[in-house]
Image (cartoon, rainbow, N blue to C red):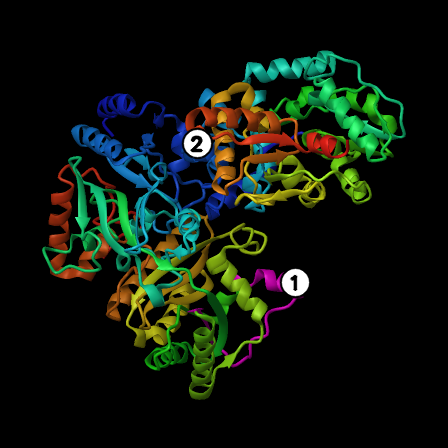
Amino acid sequence: MDEAALDQAFRALKTVLGARATRAKAHRIGYSRDWSPRHSSHIDLPDIVVVPKTTDEVVEIVKIAYRHRVPVVPFAGGTGMGGGVAAWKGGIAVETKGFDQLLELDEANMMVTTQAGITIWALNEELARSGLWFPHQPESKRACTIGASIGCDNDSTFGLRYGKILDYLSNVVMVTGKGEALRIGRRKAAFSSTGYKLLDLVVGSEGTLGVVTEATLRVFPLPETRLVRGYVCRSLDDGLRSLERVLAGGICVESAHLNCRQRLHFYTHAYREKYQREPDIPDWAEAILFLSFAGDEDVVNFSLEKATRILLDHFGAEETKEQEMVDGWWASKHSLDFIPFRQKWPDSQREKKFGAADLGLPIGRVEEAYQRFLEIASKWGQDILGMTVYNEAPNKPTASISFAVFVDDSSEESVANFYNYVKEMSAMALEMEGTMSSYIGDGDRLGGFNELEHGDSYIYMKRIKEMFDPGGIFNPGKKFESRWITGA
Amino acid sequence: MDNRSLEQYAEDIYTCNRTRCGFCVDECPVHRIKGMEAYSSRGKMMLARGLLEGIIEPSTEVQEVLEACLLCGHCQARCALNNLDIFTALRQRMAEKEFYAQEHLKKVMKMLDAGRLFDRPAHLEREGTVPLYLGCLYQSKPIETRTIISVLERCGIDPLVVEEVCCGYLAEATGFHAQFEDIRERFRATYGNHSDQEILTLCPTCTVALTESHGLNAKHAILAVAERIGQLNPRQLDLQATYHDPCHLGRMLGVFDEPRDVLRALGVVLTEMEQNRVFSSCCGGGGGVADIDQTLALEIAKNRIRDAMRVGVENIITLCPTCEPTLLRGASRLANETGVFVDVQGVWDLLDEALN
């Protein structure tokens, strides 16, 4: 970084933000990591940290950054798994949780307009007072903000019924590369066939096109009843086909997660602690499908019964009697009613950390992909944590898959091999007509390989980037470069 | 208390950095005000790692972050790592490197020199059978304290109050380990002959110190009152209120039901704030923060008053000599800004009124 430019930028930022702009290392170190696997001693220190409270302040920050050509890296929950917030080219870390105000709850139109730094958890606490909820809910929702969900297009527990963040979004306010605050998208209509769908560009852009400061989102009535059940299946393929059949039967399923046997172990620590044994899963079971149903009690009961019949009668599945295991899994997925390291993760994370390749695949390739996952993970010496298939589109099975491993982050070699593993898994995804990432984003892992996935259209991505960010200041090193994965 | 070395917590520190769940960030009362990651538990864990690895050195900026921590334990309730021990170790590391607040040092020196944190306008002693440790804050307010002793008498308790020295909590909490060792020695010399007895206490913070740092069998007096209130036929008060769990009494000692039971026995109709019991939010008075940043403490207190306003109550009742005035300051300032005053009362005052 050009130190003189940084000094000038910092002085200008201080005049706008006062104490909410700092160069103190004591503050910069807090923005030096996310949840992505990297060597335990590796950090990326931004040069400056700012905490804006309003869109106007973000406009001023971006104008200053543009003038001095200093990178701007938006930071939200800090729980990303792909290095999306890693300021590895230095610059200004913009702490977005400073703008966290709910601006309008329009109950008549079932829309909420909020500053983008509000956490999904806090937004739902506000909405619950009016009997409403915002069902886009990644597991990281206690820390993850609306802006972060837009930025990395992350997953949601309830994707099967409600989809991903784009399915809720009407519009955003985004501050672009010269410091213009643009409202992008529709007003409050659910759709529009006018103009170009710029909102689609914003979702998943990982802060490379601008800083999202506001969002208008669809909200829903809180369901009266919810039931969650687990079904052991004879194969992963059976699990997905049975879900297709359940949905084809007209049943509304709120969430569906298909886990391989190994993955279940990660979620069932509390069960093992209590009973001193593994949950009772039949030897023949290769997968477990968790379904949730929500709505009016009689409808939920009927849906559950009908889905169960389909799974049992047509696919030879069994409903697990280990309801406590199911409830424990649900707590770790949705209610988050657990203490980290007590009920979840105590048998992991202390020595090694969670890491994943997050592929999106055609649904017919899941079984094959699972076998290849086992081979590729073993080849690169990764401890296999297991696989979960997330369903992330309304009313249809999809294969957004977490292929997870434990990474020994005390070893440079193990971390390097993790990224070799991700690279080979990504190549497999493209070979299978899938995508390299379905919910983590490019981060500092995959951007250099986007040309492989997107072919001739890749050049348009670069042009779009140049239009929104002519100074190249927004989150450099992402989307078009890879830091950890090299080679063809 | 053992000498806390940061190195002994390295595994916890790395585990937090490795996991980064962020459960501790959004609800941290200091982070709610300050907005920067470093003030949250996750951020301080990064600081701890930076200090361990030599990436950062002790500095006034690090000191400022650590001194802003309330040690309220809200983050620890969301986590199974030794968060508070680590933060105390961090403060100790900083104090060893001469990074400490002069205000804290003055108080610690007063504890060492005079055996007390505050001046004591009256000599409070009483012959009795049940040892009662008043603590420095109550010793500094003899009128209120005599009322509490009177309440205990009316509950059938016969308190024994003897010459006291300070428990030393503030010295321990602010990282003055060596000084705390001296304070502990003096405390043992004074209170050692009660080491096999149950000691009733009034101040939640002292209770934690007596139990955890001095190894005594201390019990907050509200527990003794709760055991007896059913037989006392108190006058019924016409009051709708919420109860604020003091961090030390609630989260750290697990006393949640007894104060509520006592209040209900007095006819108080309680409405819970959303942040209650183990997830109660600090009043702003913890960790020595108010000594060095009264604005921060005040803003945190105002947020707690807003928590009460959010559930539509105009009275907060609490049971801590730090929480009560801190919340009252927050309520007064917020009343100036909003025109709505939320009153703050102590359980002992209500007991005095109902048992008259």
Residue drawn at 14 percent across, 61 percent down? A455
Disc 1 chain ID:
A
Q: Which residue is mark 1?
A: A274
Q: Position of residue A119 (x, y in %)?
A: 39, 46
Q: Is residue A312 left or right of residue A268?
A: left
Q: Calculate the distance from the C-alpha at mark 1 to the C-alpha at mark 2.
A: 39 Å
Q: Are marks 1 and 2 on the same chain?
A: no
Q: Amino acid at mark 2?
A: Ile
Residue drawn at 12 percent across, 44 percent down? A466
Q: Is residue A439 left or right of residue B111?
A: left
Residue B196 has which mark?
none
* Residue B11 is at least partly visible in this image: no
Q: Position of residue B285 (x, y in %)?
A: 57, 27
Is disc 2 placed on a helix, strand or loop?
helix
Q: Position of residue A456 (x, y in %)?
A: 11, 59
Q: Which quadrant of the figure contains the N terminus of chain A?
A: top left
Disc 2 chain ID:
B
In this view, the residue in front, B45 or A322, is A322
Q: Amino acid at mark 1?
A: Lys
Please tell me whether residue A281 is drawn above or below residue B253 in the rendered image.
below
Q: Is residue A391 left or right of residue B137?
A: left
Q: Which residue is mark 2?
A: B33
